[in-house]
Image (tube, grey):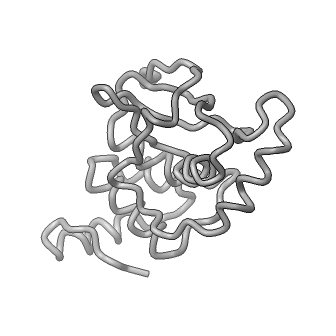
Amino acid sequence: MTEEPKPKVTLERVSLSKLREHKNNSRKKFNDLDKLAAEFDDNPMYPGEPWEPLKVYRDGNVLRIADGARRYRAMKEAGKVKQCWAYVFEDMEEAVAALIMLDTNNKERLTKEEYSVGLQMALKLGVDEDTVDKRAGTKCAAVRKRQMKRNGGEVVQLS
């Protein structure tokens, strides 16, 4: 069994002005950003920044956010910092970005609808069913894929 190659990644200070949200982010509700930003003030090393670095990838002259849109919005809204720490991937495939989005560690949980869309996006982008089920902790990827096929391959609301 061969290991999949790990993406190249560096931990860097990045300017908020160079960050852009990922176009396929399934999260549509960004609640309590002021509360989240207030938690960043407790960071003793970098007050005003989240404890967990964002995960971004290079896209020309900008950095696309693969994970951390709420943290990014909270920092921008608070207006206390101009830079933050981020894990910067040189070549982030959309499928990997979709899987990272499903990781809910230190996040407001996704709604059932947002979670469903995220699973379907991963499938639509070519991530195999076993990988989706393993990362999401489900056994429903095959069902979602069949439903999407019946709808012409489009992401549909299944929740």
Q: Is residue 112 left or right of residue 116?
A: right
In the image, residue 19 above or below residue 110: above
**Is residue 1 visible in this depiction of the protein?**
no
Residue at the spot 41% in from the left edge and 49% down from the top edge = 98
Q: Residue furthest front?
A: 79
Residue in the foreground of this view, choosing between 67 and 103: 67
Q: Quadrant of residue 95?
A: top left
Q: Position of residue 88 (x, y in %)?
A: 49, 25
Q: Position of residue 36 (x, y in %)?
A: 71, 57
Q: Is residue 52 left or right of residue 119?
A: right
In the image, residue 48 above or below residue 123: above
**Is residue 14 visible in this depiction of the protein?**
yes
In the image, residue 31 above or below residue 71: below
Q: Residue furthest bottom?
A: 159
Residue in the foreground of this view, choosing between 143 and 106: 106
Residue at the spot 61% in from the left edge and 69% down from the top edge = 31
| Image label count | 0
Q: Is residue 104 left or right of residue 16?
A: right
Residue in the foreground of this view, choosing between 75 and 114: 75
Q: Position of residue 58 (x, y in %)?
A: 37, 27
Please state, as top left, top right, bottom left or bottom right, where the C terminus lies in the image.
bottom left
Please state, as top left, top right, bottom left or bottom right, where the N terminus lies in the image.
top left
Residue at the spot 33% in from the left edge and 52% down from the top edge = 23
Residue at the spot 37% in from the left edge and 79% down from the top edge = 158
Q: Position of residue 69 (x, y in %)?
A: 52, 51
